[in-house]
Image (cartoon, helix red, strand yellow):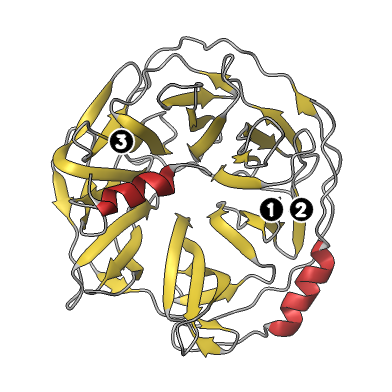
Amino acid sequence: MSEDDRTVRILRTIPDEPPAPSRIDIPRTMDEGRRRRRARRWSGGVALAAVTAVAAGGGTVAVAALRPSSEPAPVVSPSPSTVAAAPAPAVPRDCTVKLLPTGDIKKATVSSGDPSGHYLTGRVYPPKLEVYTVIWKDGVLQNRPSMPGDDGAWGDINSSGVAVGYSFTKGEEQRAYVSTGSTVTPLRGGRATANAINDAGTIAGTLGDPYEGTPATWAAPGANPVRLRLPSGFRTGEAKAIDEDGTVIGTVAKRNTESTGYLWLPNGKARLMPLPEVEGVKATYFWPESVSSGWVYGRAVRDSPDGGSRTFATYRYNIAANEYEELDIPLGPLTLGAANGWVLATTGHFEPIIIAGEKAVPLPFYNKMKEYVTSAFSADGKVAAGYTTDTTASDPVANRPLMWTCR
């Protein structure tokens, strides 16, 4: 196994009572953010949205069933089908948290979700056994086969229940897979990763070795991959996510440099994402994390002149307007957007939060646990999912898979 393979494997390993109150003073944090950052525009554009906070009302813990259900295998839709978000209230209300069922296995994570809010994917960690992949529908564990290979993870799932991801072969090579219900089959292209799928069934991922690959798309689960063009002077790239209109977001890198954001548009054009400012200084890179309804969410990175430190700021970028909007509250990865403009992420204290316009709603804690990763957000903003990362007396990393629902 190469050093790059080891790095990828390490990066993929994630180090019942009323919900506990949030520990972070969100209003003060956002006020400080507004004082530090003012609305500013440049080539590429930036508009700053003022944000204040409101506490989430109530919250309960639901008891989940422990047995998987059997259902007919989902059918891949042959035509595009965007999940339309229903008109949303001004802010999420009455949010509750639920532990997702995993049989008798406690340790598990959530890796992705679909736009409709019905499907979630995850990984479970049986004691002394290999990790295996799972899929939930409406909070119920499904009777679907795990991904072959080692250390598998579903990177995305669409509203038809078609999931894509990748694992490692015995020879420590990455292989991309698709699950369409009762079967899991490899994608064409050899060594590859599959990172995203939209409701039209188009898959985005990468061909080749880790950190040396070429971005690619598959028009359907059984199609041959099509390599995406890299800009002049750049030698590697990765396709990270795909919007419902076919826009692919990802990163590209030159030799011996880190990657920065790039867009492959449905009309065949492609362009580098402009670099916003971090504390008044142009960023060194922009790292896109997700895309929803024409908005890209991610982090701007500014390296200090001596290279000894890094500063981050969270932005969303309007593809059509070519403008950035900075979020006032510091957020950790992964930042996810809903079609109605709501934003799901975690605070600097690893607490789950939804930002809705000028308000921020802390999501309820599960079982007094205090540290979270968010990994799925429905198009209407009413379903979120993620997992805990607390350290307990019996578990150095107590991963518990969770689903939040709001009105």
Distance Cα–Cα, label 3 vs label 2:
36 Å
Q: What's the residue at 75%, 58% (across, down)?
A: 360
Name the residue carrying label 3: 167
Name the residue carrying label 2: 361
Depth check, mark 3 against mark 2: the one in front is 3
| 352 horizontally vs 267: left or right | right
The amino acid on which the numbered mark 1 sits, given as a three-letter code, is: Ile
Q: What's the residue at 64%, 84% (across, down)?
A: 39
The picture quadrant where one finds residue 229 is bottom left
How far from the left and from the top, in percent, is residue 120?
Answer: 51, 32
Classify mark 2: helix, strand or loop: strand
Q: In the displayed orientation, state which residue is furthest to the front.
A: 393
How far from the left and from the top, in percent, is residue 93?
Answer: 79, 44
| 274 horizontally vs 64: left or right | left
Depth check, mark 1 against mark 3: the one in front is 3
Q: Nearer the viewer, residue 23 or 78?
A: 23
407 vs 130: above or below: below
| 150 horizontally vs 228: left or right | right
Marks 1 and 3, the one that precedes in the sequence:
3
The amino acid on which the numbered mark 3 sits, given as a three-letter code, is: Ser
Total numbered badges shown on the rendered structure: 3
The picture quadrant where one finds residue 31 is bottom right
Quadrant of the rendering where the C terminus is positioned: top right
